[in-house]
Amino acid sequence: MENPLSPRQEPVGTPLPPAQAVQFLRTPRSVRYYREELVPREKLAELLDIGRYPQTGENSQGIRYLVVSGREKLDELNHLYCRLAREIPEDFPGYYKIQHTVHLQETYGHDALFYNSQHLILAISDESLETWRQNAQFSLTFISLLAPSLGLGTCWVGLLEFLACFHPYMEEFAEAVHLPTGTRICGCMLVGYPDVQFRRLVERDPLQIEWR
């Protein structure tokens, strides 16, 4: 008997063996070198579809995506970022990191924000979604985990989030990408074909646990 309010889905598969699961979870890396080749929309849609599946508080979900593609469009967003960076006060969160990014670009011509990527994923939600930040992080994490299986690389753009996700600068970014009224940018991630190959897994700080 099938509940009409909850259509039957495919059965749960057998979980990966622990070692294989750990290998999968350790594989994604932040990619900061991209090929000039554009990723087909069909492949980007396949990647973004996995972002629908992470757990969210009270199953709130509510995250959709806007993909900005092409160097010209990303350069325009980068110019906006640099212009706004000159206006922020010194007590603004991330002030020195933001200024350093602008310095690298204006002094050395290094794209320290988008790393010459061809695509920027913007996670979007309604302004009324209370868990917008957490839900976007869950969603983009799933996307970054799947990306290597599709031959893609990703990199979180936290420096852009400093301005694009928070008042008083978020409105200018929303206007630049033509967001509908009542929506907001929740997270930013680069995606593209990597121009670098990682041959080994990366190590992290030792595990720390306290027991009570």
Image (cartoon, rainbow, N blue to C red):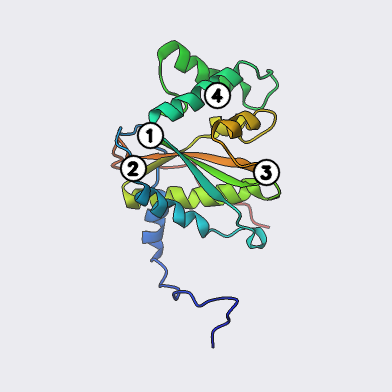
At x 45%, y 50%, the residue is: 143
Q: Which of pointers 3 and 2 lies earlier in the amino acid sequence? A: 2
The residue that mark 3 highlights is 182
In contact (CB < 8 Å): disc 1 and disc 2: yes
Q: Which residue is mark 2?
A: 39
Amino acid residing under circle 2:
Val
Q: Residue at x 61, y 42 (%)?
A: 180
Q: CA distance from mark 4 to mark 1?
A: 17 Å
Q: CA distance from mark 3 to mark 2?
A: 30 Å
Does the rendering let one see residue 208? no
Residue under label 1: 118
- Amino acid marked by disc 1: Gln
Residue for badge 4:
81
Between disc 4 and disc 3, whose residue precedes? 4
Q: Residues within 10 Å of mark 2 (few under 14, many from 20)?
A: some
For label 4, the SS is helix
Where does the image place residue 94, in percent across and percent down from the top left? Answer: 62, 26
In terms of sequence position, does the residue under pointer 4 or pointer 1 come before the other? 4
Query: Which mark is first along the chain, 4 or 2?
Result: 2
Inspect the image, locate mark 4, and give the three-letter code of the amino acid beneath it.
Tyr
Mark 3 vs mark 2: give the one in front: 3
Please identify the quarter of the rendering in which residue 192 is found. Answer: top left
